[in-house]
Image (cartoon, rainbow, N blue to C red):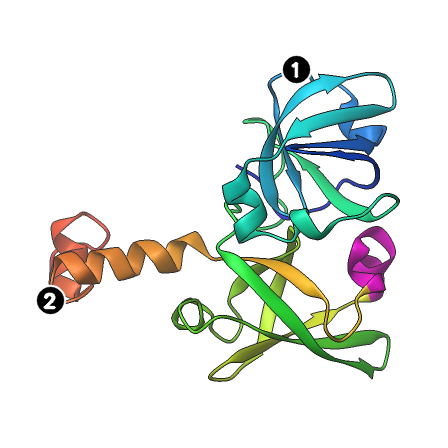
């Protein structure tokens, strides 16, 4: 489990069939072989490491569903270690399971922020709502506007300075992970045609009996 709060921006130092090598420092502190790490929001396993770099294996399915297969030598990537049980939870629930990719449509300055509008596949749009959470390249963001085929997020100065999102350009492909809670609600609705009703919430202990 991750939070979408990027800890460090790493640099791609090697690209081989089925493997990436990344230069980093902070995320390697207290990290061991076999630990999970989010790279642009995709959860991968560290297979080798040294003081200032580490490697991960990348499956074909990961390349199909994310932008990791589009990376080149020297590219920057967002990095986050899996959250510790006793750690502070500063973002939102991010699984590191990228749902699909989107495309940056536009970037518009707004005072100290930049408004990014991103297209998303139709199958993801039902999970994206105004003021809801979304992870873009592993960064926890709040949706400020939602249309039929796209959504917008505000990139504040701190986010741009500490992640790769400051380098976005129209046409760039980004990883998208929607809020897991929305998926659970849809699943509950599929199992019960009544949807999530007051009776359902009472039955499962979320509300006191009326």
In percent of width and height, residue 208 lies at 18, 54
Q: Which residues are magenta?
A: 157-167
Q: Answer left or right for 76 relative to 85.
A: right
Label 1 CA crowd tier, 10 Å (few <14, some 14–19, many 20+):
few
Asked if one can make out residue 95 in the rendered structure from this viewpoint, the answer is no
Question: In this picture, is 3 found above or below 201?
Answer: above
Residue at image location 57% in from the left, 61% down from the top: 101
In percent of width and height, residue 97 lies at 50, 45
Asked if one can make out residue 199 in the rendered structure from this viewpoint, the answer is yes
Mark closer to the chain start, 1 or 2 = 1
* Residue matched to label 2: 193
Q: CA distance from mark 1 to mark 2?
A: 45 Å
Residue lying farthest front? 17
Label 2 CA crowd tier, 10 Å (few <14, some 14–19, many 20+):
few
Residue 33 is marked as 1
Residue at image location 83% in from the left, 59% down from the top: 158
Q: Answer left or right for 100 relative to 156.
A: left
Q: Nearer the viewer, residue 85 or 193?
A: 193
Does residue 42 belong to the magenta stretch?
no
Residue 56 is marked as none
Question: In this picture, is 1 found above or below 175?
Answer: above
Q: Find residue 200 and report its image quarter.
A: bottom left
In percent of width and height, residue 190 lies at 18, 61
């Amino acid at each position: 489990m991750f939070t979408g709060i990027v800890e460090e921006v790493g640099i791609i130092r090697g690209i081989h069939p089925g493997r990436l090598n990344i230069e980093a420092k902070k995320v390697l502190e207290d990290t061991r072989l076999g630990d999970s790490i989010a790279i642009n929001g995709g959860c991968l396993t560290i297979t080798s490491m040294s003081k200032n770099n580490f490697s991960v294996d990348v499956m074909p399915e990961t390349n199909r569903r994310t932008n990791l297969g589009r990376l080149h030598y020297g590219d920057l990537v967002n990095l986050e270690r899996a959250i510790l049980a006793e750690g502070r939870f500063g973002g939102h629930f991010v699984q590191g399971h990228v749902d699909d990719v989107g495309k940056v449509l536009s970037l518009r300055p707004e005072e100290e922020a930049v408004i990014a509008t991103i297209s998303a596949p139709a199958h993801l749009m039902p999970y994206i709502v105004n003021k809801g959470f979304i992870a873009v390249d592993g960064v926890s963001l709040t949706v400020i506007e939602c249309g039929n085929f796209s959504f917008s997020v505000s990139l504040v100065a701190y986010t741009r300075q500490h992640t790769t999102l400051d380098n976005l350009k129209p046409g760039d492909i980004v990883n998208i992970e929607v809020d897991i809670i929305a998926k659970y609600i849809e699943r509950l609705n599929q199992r019960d045609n009544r949807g999530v009703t007051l009776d359902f919430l009472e039955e499962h202990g979320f509300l006191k009996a009326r």
